[in-house]
Image (spheres, grey):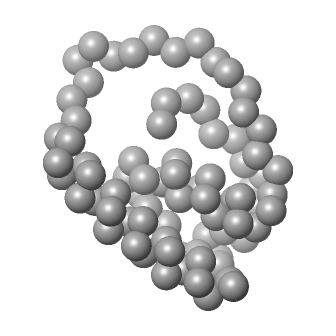
Amino acid sequence: MCGFKFIRKSDYDYLISHFNPMSDGWFFNSELLIKTEKLKKKIVEIPVNWKDDGDSRVKIFRTVKEYLLEIERVKKQLKTLA
C-alpha cells in the first residue's frame, strides 16, 4: 500500500463516474488498481525508496473485515461490466 500512485485525470474521472462510490480508506489503492486493470489500462510499477514509520498502528481485525466488505462491493460493481 505504500508508495505513490499516479493516474491521468481523465482516467480517474472515468473511474469515479463509472464506479462510484470508491473507497476513501486504505482499500482505495487496491480498488484503483483492480478497476484500472479491468479497464485494460496500462499499469506501470516504478520502485521508490520508502522509510517505514515505526509508530504506525493498524487494527488488523478491523482492517481485514473492512477489506472483505470492500472486495464484495467491488466484485458486484465489476459484474456490471461483464
Q: Is residue 5 above or below residue 29?
A: above
Can residue 10 be seen in this snapshot? no
Task: Tell me where residue 9 appears, x and y as whole percent.
Answer: 75, 56
- Residue 73 as seen in the image, left or right of residue 62: right
- Residue 8 as seen in the image, left or right of residue 62: right
Task: Tell me where residue 14 appears, x and y as whole percent.
Answer: 72, 70
**Residue drawn at x 62%, y 53% as measured from the top left:** 33
- How many labels were placed on the picture? 0
Task: Tell me where residue 81 appears, x and y as whole percent.
Answer: 68, 83
Question: 43 or 19: nearer the eye?
Answer: 43
* Quarter holding residue 60: top left
Task: Tell me where residue 61 appears, x and y as whole percent.
Answer: 17, 48
Report the quarter where the C terminus lies: bottom right
Q: Is residue 40 above or below residue 4?
A: below
**Residue drawn at x 76%, y 46% as measured from the top left:** 43
**Residue drawn at x 61%, y 59% as measured from the top left:** 34
Question: 4 or 72: nearer the eye?
Answer: 72
* Quarter holding residue 48: top right
* Quarter holding residue 55: top left
Can residue 30 be seen in this snapshot? yes
Q: Is residue 48 above or below residue 21?
A: above
**Residue drawn at x 45%, y 12% as measured from the top left:** 51
